[in-house]
Image: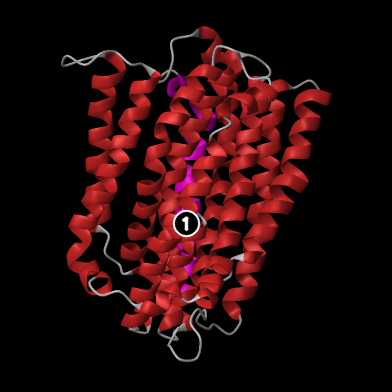
């Protein structure tokens, strides 16, 4: 996913400067890269059982996780291809096909889950396997629907193949631009993933409470994530137009909106944790854990909003390496060590591990803000992908 986000600055800046050939090359290279990345991504997911056994996860959970992972493998390629179409269309400012597609795909996923998990409308009850099949089918429907709805905007960029798409040097430059985004996301996601694994060692109730709190925090995170994507597009288009004032204005507005929204949701998590946790479970043990973690989610909400929006701003500028390094420092230099210390050495358990996430997110947010302040004031220029025989 992260590697394909290189399309944000490439296409947005090309749109800003009205460089149609560069848009076509970016889109076609993105589809090629999605195909190349799908195979290793699927191979990395195959050894799920031995990995979870090695990580000492609850024995009753492991076969369910293995079943789910194996059945969602056919959905990896359409998921990545959808990402290419989504990044391209949003960089062009065409959001309607994306929104309609995602709404339709989610409704389809809900329906298929209802049918396949519980065995409605004559289908056998498949449980976790039904959920996995629903996800895979929905992902294929998602990419096909977006391709159809977005075809009027995408047709001129896909109707004729551009041979320079296969040139190795530009492909390498695009991967060098996108790979740090992928590594940055890995640093962040694996920090949260490792926290979940460590909490899983504490027991099923602790893991379930963690998942409830994390799902709620992830739900609110979607808003600043969308603002981050908008920031990448608007800043990138401003760079393409050679309009630094517009880039700075878009960056400032995105930070206000993203952090402001998370301030509201953070206050809600701090003041009403049991109300929100109760939407997910009626288990007293799980509810107790989730209610103790949600206030910590409230604490890191603003930091989470700032870090994701600043990452989008820097992505629009074509600066992808700095967020990678900053995420490494914040999550793995501060957050995970602090979580281990508080969770196990200090005996705070799941709460201690979540305090590590709070501290890690705070460190990332502060350092990224400093980086944005420096980069947005510097001279802005387009990222260079193609050689001198082509425009960017």
Type of secondary structure dominating the magenta stretch: helix
Where is residue 153, by image quadrant? bottom left
* Front residue (pair 246, 320): 320
Mark 1 surroundings within 10 Å by alpha-carbon count, few (fewer than 14), some (14 through 19), many (20 or more): few
| Residue 149 spot, x, y in % from top left | 18, 57
Q: Is residue 113 left or right of residue 391?
A: left
* Dot 1: element: helix
Q: Is residue 214 left or right of residue 87?
A: right
**Viewer can see residue 203:** yes
Indicate whether residue 128 is drawn in magenta: no
Residue depicted at 65% across the width and 67% down the height: 371
* Front residue (pair 77, 100): 77
Is residue 102 positioned above or below 8 on the image? above
Residue depicted at 27% across the width and 73% down the height: 157
Residue depicted at 66% across the width and 48% down the height: 362
| Residue 115 spot, x, y in % from top left | 23, 20
**Viewer can see residue 350:** no
Is residue 95 positioned above or below 160 on the image? above
Q: Is residue 291 left or right of residue 330?
A: left
**In the image, which residues are magenta?**
249-277
| Residue 314 spot, x, y in % from top left | 55, 67
Q: Residue furthest top?
A: 284
């Amino acid at each position: 996913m992260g590697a394909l986000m290189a399309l944000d600055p490439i296409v947005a800046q090309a749109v800003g400067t009205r460089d149609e050939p560069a848009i076509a090359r970016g889109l076609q290279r993105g589809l090629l890269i999605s195909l190349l990345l799908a195979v290793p991504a699927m191979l990395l997911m195959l050894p799920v059982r031995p990995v979870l056994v090695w990580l000492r996860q609850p024995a009753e959970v492991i076969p369910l996780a293995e079943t789910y992972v194996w059945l969602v493998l056919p959905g990896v390629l359409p998921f990545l291809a959808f990402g290419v179409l989504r990044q391209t269309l949003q960089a062009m400012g065409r959001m309607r096909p994306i929104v309609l597609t995602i709404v339709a795909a989610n409704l389809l996923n809900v329906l298929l889950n209802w049918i396949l998990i519980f065995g409605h409308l004559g289908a056998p009850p498949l449980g976790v396997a039904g959920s996995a099949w629903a996800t895979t089918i929905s992902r294929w429907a998602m990419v096909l629907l977006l391709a159809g709805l977005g075809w009027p905007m995408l047709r001129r960029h896909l109707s004729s193949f551009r041979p320079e798409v296969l040139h190795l040097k530009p492909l390498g430059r695009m991967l060098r631009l996108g790979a740090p985004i992928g590594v940055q996301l890995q640093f962040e996601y694996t920090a949260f993933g490792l926290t979940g694994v460590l909490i899983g060692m504490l027991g099923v109730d602790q893991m379930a409470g963690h998942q409830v709190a994390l799902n709620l925090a992830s739900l609110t995170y979607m808003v600043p994530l969308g603002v981050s994507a908008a920031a990448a597009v608007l800043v990138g288009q401003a760079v393409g137009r050679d309009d630094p004032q517009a880039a700075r204005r878009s960056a400032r507005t995105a930070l206000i909106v993203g952090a402001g929204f998370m301030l509201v949701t953070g206050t809600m998590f701090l003041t009403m944790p049991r109300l929100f946790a109760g939407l997910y479970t009626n288990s007293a043990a799980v509810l107790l854990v989730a209610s103790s973690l949600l206030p910590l989610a409230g604490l890191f909400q603003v930091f989470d909003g700032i870090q994701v929006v600043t990452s989008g701003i820097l992505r629009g500028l074509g600066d992808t390496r700095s967020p990678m390094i900053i995420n490494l420092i914040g999550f793995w230099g501060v957050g995970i060590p602090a979580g281990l210390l508080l969770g196990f050495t200090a005996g705070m358990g799941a709460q201690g591990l979540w305090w590590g996430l709070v501290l890690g997110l705070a460190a990332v947010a502060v350092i990224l803000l400093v980086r944005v302040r420096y980069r947005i004031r510097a001279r802005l220029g387009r990222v260079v992908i193609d050689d001198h025989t082509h425009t960017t």
